[in-house]
Image (cartoon, grey):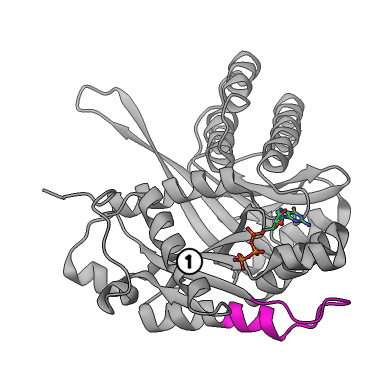
Amino acid sequence: MPTERAVSPLPGTLKKLGVITAIRDTQLVEQSLLRTLAPILGVLETSLYRINGQQQVTHILHHSRTGTRDSDGAERISERIDAIRNETNLPEHIYMLIDNVRLLGQACHRSGPNGLIFCYPLRSGELQSGYLVFERGGKLTEVEDAVVTGVLQVYSNYYALLDSSQRDRLTGLHNRYAMEVGLDRLWEELSMQPSTAQTQARRDCYWLGVLDIDHFKQINDQFGHVIGDEILLLVSRVMGKTMRRTDLLFRYGGEEFIAIVEARDLEKAVQLFERLRKAVETYRYPQVGKVTLSGGFSMVTPTVLPKSVLERADRAMYEAKKAGRNRVFHYHTLLEQGVLQELETGSITLF
Ligand SMILES: Nc1nc2c(ncn2[C@@H]2O[C@H](COP(=O)(O)OP(=O)(O)OP(=O)(O)O)[C@@H](O)[C@H]2O)c(=O)[nH]1
């Protein structure tokens, strides 16, 4: 891996830390970290890994810079950030390096094809929450090492603060704000992808489901709010355990949850949401016994604004309540059946 001469780190680093800590979106903060460190270290590729809920190390972000020379001899650097969807299959040498850092509790390096591969831990309190990995020709100077360690500490503290502000205190799930940011981002990503019939057929679709616990007021009234809170926590855990690594679950508010899942087609999406419904229904809740939920879901597509996708799923969920609860309905199926009529608002005409 080629390297370039490292630039003097301190003034630029302080400026960039100011930029990082002004960002309110956790994914953009992660991207900004890699963009900040790569030129300071004079490296062309950096990777960020996180430890997920199942304690697995997952590759989440890769940043690369390519240097090219213009015809007039001037050097241009182009940057590229790839968000990697929770890749847990790491190359053996990276896995071993991260394992060393995990055991020793400090940054380590090992030889790589183009010099040395470095791994620095990200800390959340006493725990390691992730890793920064990069390769460069030679060792870091003391100043560079101190800069990387300091930037990572400020970044980790800021990330933890930002992340906790986007989580629901009771269940630990991401909250409504995080859901809205995440849905807007997903919608933008989908809008930017080329959409030919061929790519459309190959690509998985995203589906958004609104899931609402049935008769939750009765649970509160009969057993009290503390038990009500316990049910919210248990239902969120049962759903979380039933979902796949790539699925997302949010507490939207009160007794309402939102799931965003990837599925090839409607049949698969129905299966996923049905699995959630059944898991909640079959779990036996101490004191309360059986708890059920009703849900509605709709496809996330660039031709429909995010708030309208939510509205569609919500309307389907209300139909599930009306039909007797403990069921999950698909919005478009309800349209086809004539149970619901399309609302005019929210769909976008593409030219
Ligand atoms: N314990 C507890 N209760 C909550 C919380 N947030 C909202 N609630 C309660 O959730 C209940 C929701 O009641 P409703 O909106 O009438 O819905 P429901 O009883 O579930 O009825 P359906 O949705 O029609 O099946 C209200 O009594 C709220 O007070 C919370 O954080 N903890």
Q: Quadrant of residue 250?
A: bottom right
Label 1 Cα crowd, 10 Å radius (few <14 / some 14-19 / many 20+): some
Q: Is residue 340 above or below residue 112?
A: below
Quarter of image, ligand 1: bottom right
User: Is residue 293 shown to the viewer in this render?
Assistant: yes
Most foreground residue, 90 or 202: 202
Q: What residue do we see at 77% from left, 69% from top?
A: 234
Q: Is 141 left, or right, of 85 in this rendering?
A: right
Q: Position of residue 274 (x, y in %)?
A: 53, 82
Residue 198, picture quadrant: bottom left
Residue at 64 percent across and 51 percent down: it is 174
What is the residue that sits farthest to the top in this orientation? 11
Query: Residue 179 or 320: which is nearer the viewer?
Result: 320
Residue 1 in sight in this render: no
Indicate the amino acid at tag 1.
Tyr
- Residue sitting at x 77%, y 61%: 99
Vertical relation: 201 (above or below) 193: below
Q: Is residue 282 magenta?
A: yes
Confirm whether the magenta stretch covers residue 124.
Answer: no
84 w.r.t. 294: above or below: above
For label 1, the SS is helix
Q: Is mark 1 within 8 Å of ligand 1?
A: no
Q: Residue at x 59, y 27 (%)?
A: 20
| Residue segment shown in magenta | 275-292
Rendering coords of residue 13 (x, y %): 62, 21
